[in-house]
Image: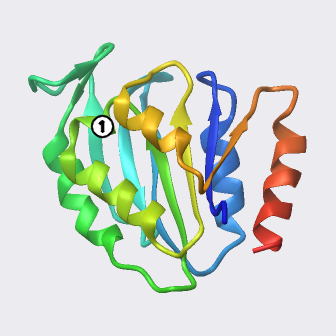
Amino acid sequence: MRKNILITGMPKSGKSTLLKKIIKKHDKKTGFVTNEIRENGERVGFEIETHTGQKSVLANINFKTSLKVSKYFVNIKNLDEIIPKVSEFNGDDLLFIDEIGQMELFSKKFKQLVLRYFDSPNICIATISKIYSEPFTEEIKKRNDVILIEIDETTRDAKEKYLEECLKSR
């Protein structure tokens, strides 16, 4: 049964927005979203927010770490400290990850979490980059239990309805 849903698309296509709309409708859920951090109208980083509201900064232009994606320095320690908080879940929880992307993939614990979610009997919804590819993400996309939904500005609303129908039929 295909019960893992990957939302993909170009940057700013609405992947995270769509994921947040879907999970907002579910009371029983476990996972995290990634929010932009803005100062004076400019994006300066990203924070992770769990289903319980705990937050931790994943990346920031002012960090000084050895890991960097574009202009953002990535703090894997912060991500690894959040992972135990989203690793335990109930059998009826909707699992979610925003996103399986370049920054997060620096973490081995993150990759283990992705596999834990995907291998569980639970439905998992995740966003995944369309422009960044590496062996782990390619293997995830090829799994027999994955539905890959690509969105853009013109198809976002229709894909939201399709995604809701997928969840109802499970």
Residue, far top: 70
Residue 168 pos. (x, y %): 82, 72
Q: Residues within 10 Å of mark 1 (few under 14, many from 20)?
A: some
Amino acid carrying mark 1 in the image: Leu
Res 135 quadrant in image: top left
Residue 129 pos. (x, y %): 52, 30
Q: Nearer the viewer, residue 160 or 60?
A: 160
Q: Nearer the viewer, residue 97 or 62?
A: 97
Q: In the rendered image, is residue 45 in sight?
A: no
Residue designated by label 1: 105
Q: Nearer the viewer, residue 45 or 118?
A: 118
104 vs 163: above or below: above
What residue appears at the point 18 percent right and 59 percent down from the top-left corner? 81
Q: In the figure, is residue 144 to the left or right of 56?
A: right
Q: Is disc 1 placed on a helix, strand or loop?
A: helix
Quadrant containing the N terminus is bottom right
What residue appears at the point 79 percent right and 62 percent down from the top-left corner? 166
Residue 93 pos. (x, y %): 54, 79
18 vs 123: above or below: above
